[in-house]
Every structure is written in structure tokens, then in C-alpha cells.
Amino acid sequence: MANIKTINRQILLKLLLASVLMFGFGYALVPLYKALCEVTGINVVTNKNNYGVRAHGATKPENSQVDYSRTVTIEFDSNSRGPFSFKPMKNYLEVHPGEMAEIVYKVSNNLNRPVDAQAIPSYAPKAATEFFTKLECFCFQQQTLNPHQMRDMPVVFVIDPNLPKDVKTITLSYTFFELGVGIKPAGSSTPQAVKTAL
């Protein structure tokens, strides 16, 4: 009888230890993710106060590091894997390196049920990835859309003035996919965007 109590106590202690370790691992995932993003340059968040904003045609000239001698064309593309209508409100913007700009993507859930989804960005050319900083993006977190809900989702970004001079066009492409149904995002290929404003 004593042996059974000892065994039960040992099992209970092991289960408690496992629970504490699992909770600690879950708690550590957020800082680990942030560290991974900083190392890889993906989903880097920067302080918006460091930049002037060019959103919906308005410009605040707070940033003195805007390179007005250069213009870079940013093309926007969208792909959906799931029950969505998903597209950018404009197909391209022309921005100066160092200038903060905004593009809005529109998404709608075409189902009669709520849908959890996530967006994954890709860039072309790949060399431009480290010079493309997103300050605000719907891709930073999971999105939940109610039945037939439509939503405008902004992306606020800035192009680093150190972008190589030979890069004149950058394509930002998002794949928006439903979570939990085995649908994987498209590969790294980026379709060509048509350069006409909607």
C-alpha cells in the first residue's frame, strides 16, 4: 500500500512538473518569436514616430532622412487559400526611400461561419526584404472574420534609404489562408502585379 502511495506521489509530481514546463514554454513562445523575427528580419516592428506618414495622400514631414531624389515603385499582390475575397485597394504606390506609406488590403469571408486566417508576406526581389520595414501589418497576428464580414486591413511600411540604387521596383505579395483546415500558403514565387490603380 505504501508503495502505491509513493508511486502515485511520484506520478503527481511528474505531472505537476510537466504542467509547469509546458506553461513556461508557452509563455516563452512570444519573446522567442520576437527574437526570431529580429534575427530573420521578418515582421519587424519599428516606431512609427520616427517617420513621416503618407497615408491616403497625406504627408507629415517629420522624417529628415527621406531620399526625395529617388522613387521606388511598390507593387502589391494578393493570393487567397480559402473562402476569401482578398485584394489590395491599389496595385502599386510610388514612394521615396525613408518615407512612411500605407496600403490597405480588403478581405471578406464568403462563408456562413467564422473563419480564422493568417497572412504570410513575400517580397521580390528577395534582396529587398531586409530594406522593407513594416510598421503596422495585419500579418502580425491571426485574423478572425465573422460570417460574410468585410474588413479593411492596413499595412504601414517604409523603405530603407540604404536600398541598393539598382532596385527600382519591389513587389509585396500576401497569401491569406484559413487556419486549421490543412491549407498551406503558396510557395515563394511572386506573381507579377498589374501596375494600374484600382
Image (cartoon, rainbow, N blue to C red):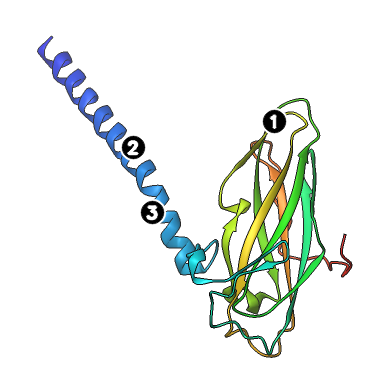
- Residue linked to disc 3: 31
- The residue sitting at 40% across, 55% down in the picture is 32
124 and 156: which one is in front?
A: 156
- The residue sitting at 25% across, 29% down in the picture is 16
Q: Earlier in the sequence, mark 2 or mark 1?
A: 2
The kind of residue tagged 3 is Pro
In this rendering, would 64 be left or right of 196?
Answer: left
Secondary-structure class at tag 1: loop
The quadrant where residue 78 appears: bottom right
In this rendering, would 127 be left or right of 112?
Answer: left
Front position among marks 2 and 1: 1
The tag on residue 23 is 2
User: In 3D space, how far apart are the residues under numbered discs 3 and 1 (Cα atoms)?
Assistant: 30 Å
Q: Position of residue 6 (x, y in %)?
A: 14, 19
Look at the image and tell me in which quarter the C terminus lies: bottom right
- Relative to 65, say whether 109 is above or below: above
165 and 158: which one is in front?
A: 158
The kind of residue tagged 2 is Phe
Res. 190 visible in picture: yes
The quadrant where residue 24 appears: top left
- Relative to 143, say whether 170 is above or below: below
- Residue linked to disc 1: 146
- Relative to 16, say whether 6 is above or below: above
Circle 3 crowding by C-alpha within 10 Å: few under 14, some 14–19, many from 20 = few
Circle 1 crowding by C-alpha within 10 Å: few under 14, some 14–19, many from 20 = some
Q: Position of residue 96 (x, y in %)?
A: 67, 80
The kind of residue tagged 1 is Asn
User: In 3D space, how far apart are the residues under numbered discs 2 and 1 (Cα atoms)?
Assistant: 30 Å
In the image as oriented, which residue stretches furthest toward the left? 2
